[in-house]
Amino acid sequence: MHRARSGFTVVEVALVCVVIAIIAAIAVPSWRGMRANMSLRSAAGIVNDALSLARARAIASGHYYVVYFNTGVGGGTDICGNALVDANGNPAPVAVIDDGEPGSADQNCCIDAGEAVETKPAIAGVQWGASAATVRAPGEPVAADAVYASGSSFFDPGGAQTEWVAFRPDGVPVGFADNGGPCVLGRVGTGGGAIYLTNGDRDVATVLTSLGTTRTHSWEAAGAQWTD
């Protein structure tokens, strides 16, 4: 009698290796894409959280709160020239500032000594702006058409592009002008805008309404439109 052969032939091993290689070729890019999209959603969540946090704290404290987004429009500083950095001195993409009571000496839309400043971390692989979207997000003013791809569609009361917004003690967002010092706050209706983020393949936009609510939209390339 002959013993039955055990093990695998060279051909069988080679076939298994080919199958594994094919699966890896399909799965690895898919996994990378999933991670990139997860990072993008996390970054959009940070933007939304910063706006919601500032509004909630303004209402709770009776103070003005200011949110800065370090998109590059303002050169990495607040309107008084203070660098937007975290506790370790690293550039902060988002900063939420307790600007004090209305009419107080430090209520100037700037980072002053003793004021509470909360910064948010950067997310690897995510940049400001839009790489695929061809139109502004829903709820945006027509003026956003010219600037949304840069990352910020906030404007000051005079119509100049900015990267910041203030929340009044009643929670209503307002724009303010960069006068190199104490800010000039706009009226109700001047604080709406959006922050756009991209991972190079997909875009998201977090829109702040003139009443202070937020909504995040994703760009769907297949339909060439923003999701609701």
Image: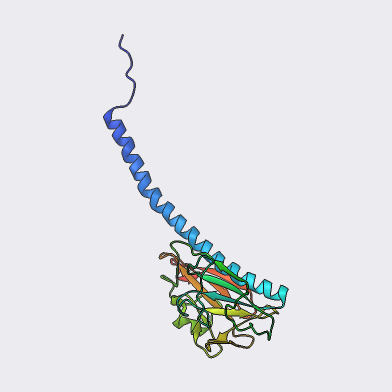
Taking 162 as reference, is 56 left or right? Answer: right
Where's residue 213, x and y in %? 63, 74
Q: Please, which residue is most extreme toward the bottom here? A: 158
Image side of residue 135 versus residue 47, left or right: left
- The quadrant of the picture occupied by the N terminus is top left
In this view, the residue in front, 25 or 46, is: 46
Front-lying residue, 143 or 224: 143
Q: Is residue 228 visible?
A: no
The residue sitting at the top extreme is: 1
Q: Seen in the image, is 22 located left or right of residue 33?
A: left
The residue at the point 56 percent across, 74 percent down is: 207
Whether residue 80 is visible, yes or no, is yes
> In the picture, residue 100 is in which quadrant?
bottom right
User: Is the residue 125 above or below the residue 101 in the image?
Assistant: above
Percent position of residue 173, x then y:
63, 80
Q: Quadrant of the C terminus?
A: bottom right
What residue lies at 69% left-to-right and 81% top-to-bottom? 101
Kindly indicate the quadrant of the structure image that contains residue 51: bottom right
| Along the line of sight, the residue nearer the viewer: 51 or 136 | 51
Q: Residue furthest front?
A: 113
- Seen as rendered, the residue at the extreme left is 10
